[in-house]
Amino acid sequence: MNQTLQIQQHHRSIRSFSNEPVSDEMLAQIIAAAHQAPTSMNAQEISLIVVRDAEHRTKIAELAGRQAHVAQTPVFIVIVIDFNKTDIGMRKAGNTQIIHESMEGFGVGAVDAGIVLGTLITAAESLGLGITPIGGVRHDPQGMVELLDLPPLTFAMVGLCIGHIAHDAPVKPRMDIKTFRHDERYDASGYSAAIDAYDKTIMQHWQNVGRSDGTPWSTSLAPFQSVYYPAVRPVAAMQGLLNDK
Amino acid sequence: MNQTLQIQQHHRSIRSFSNEPVSDEMLAQIIAAAHQAPTSMNAQEISLIVVRDAEHRTKIAELAGRQAHVAQTPVFIVIVIDFNKTDIGMRKAGNTQIIHESMEGFGVGAVDAGIVLGTLITAAESLGLGITPIGGVRHDPQGMVELLDLPPLTFAMVGLCIGHIAHDAPVKPRMDIKTFRHDERYDASGYSAAIDAYDKTIMQHWQNVGRSDGTPWSTSLAPFQSVYYPAVRPVAAMQGLLNDK
């Protein structure tokens, strides 16, 4: 197995970063990797906002719902869906952009944000750095608009903590590969038994790592009983996205 | 620069694949890498459908809007948002899933689909394979539901061609990094000039590679004048997603 596959198969989220800064050179290499990632139709409708200023990070940690590790991470990258960039291109060509108003446009932007995030993760980990993705940038999206000067047609979709690792974390086991990989057709016949087994696996994992507050996977999904970041839809609409086409 | 960063910074989409099959071992390693990628709240609400059957690939190529290279690729992976998996877990814990009905849920699923896609891309390229992402699985989403036996609460979001490279492709230049990387705050002051420059760069690129049908970037965005996969919203709703919360 090559180095890249080893890194990816050993992925774990890190929540304890040292004070050592991430060098400009490392950051430039990581971002150059994400810059080359594919986007739908080469639209390049993703922008990154690199936040290193300590006060700025503290504000994001508050906006994200008091996620202290965001403030403690030397580099925080916000991944923005940027239909403002494409709109400027469209206008130059004498065209009128519509896609951003649709579910399809939001979905394309979110997939491409994810491709960039996945690329950043592997790139950072290849340099021995630790990462944690942060969905909490959607907790107070209007606060993010104001803090980051986000204009209409843009939306902060997800964030990423990057830093040197202070305390490493164990690899968290995943559910049986049969619930992830299907061949030729979707087949959920093994899901129920796999979930039962995984609930036991993850409880053993919590015990191994000394986390007494750990719960079975099926119980840990309880936040899915609600729309846990309910401001996404109204703020996206205020930004000119998602007008229901 | 390490091997992983070199691979990522050299990404290009391949549209010419040889007949050599992708070995079971290679495919297993690539999928194991994606299986370990992070998901929001460890929900693991992504499933892959690996399509290798030639007839099956031909049907997907038709559903995707006659994209011939899908039929010619030895492996096609469909990346599915799978809130059926989490729903089974939620029910086991006595809870009722709501998240899948919301924009937030669709966005989370799309981001996590993108993370998996970005991870698959780097993994496949690390083995010397070529890839092309295919948004065309959203061209006829109901056709995909029927072909892949997709139950309620699932949606085929994006696809990926993987194979051995027959004819390599040059790296396509990206717009100036200043339009991708912002520091501390969003700043579009350089966008217009960067787009002008990139329109020239991409035309030079088309000339270099002998593509007489190439257009400037700003013109190539013309499909954004419409919602080019308009069936996404209604079919997602039929699948029980996106009921407007």
Image (cartoon, coloured by chain):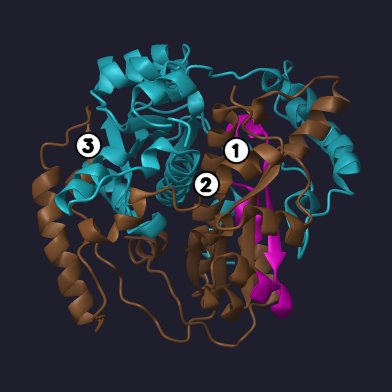
Chain colours: A brown, B cyan
The x and y percentages for residue B201 are 82, 36
Q: Residue at x 61, y 57 (%)?
A: A140
* N-term mark: 2 or 3: 2
Chain part drawn in magenta: A31-59
Q: Is residue B220 left or right of residue A29?
A: right
- Residue lying at 22% horizontally and 42% vertically, measured from the top left: B24
Residue located at (34% from left, 54% from top):
B33
Q: Earlier in the sequence, mark 3 or mark 1?
A: 1
Q: Residues within 10 Å of mark 2 (few under 14, many from 20)?
A: many
| Labels 2 and 3 positioned on one and the same chain | yes
The residue that mark 2 highlights is A115
Instruction: Answer with mark 2 or mark 1, whichever residue precedes in sequence.
Output: 1
Between residues A62 and A119, which one lies in front from this camera angle?
A62
Task: Say which residue label 3 marks.
Answer: A182
Q: Secondary structure at mark 2?
A: helix
Crowding near pointer 1: few (<14 within 10 Å), some, many (20+)? many
Point out which mark residue B201 bears. none
Name the residue type under label 2.
Answer: Ile
Chain under callout 1: A
Q: Chain of mark 2?
A: A
Label 1 belongs to which residue? A39
Marks 2/1: CA–CA distance: 8 Å
In the foreground, A144 or B147:
A144
Residue B11 coordinates in the image, percent (x, y): 57, 45
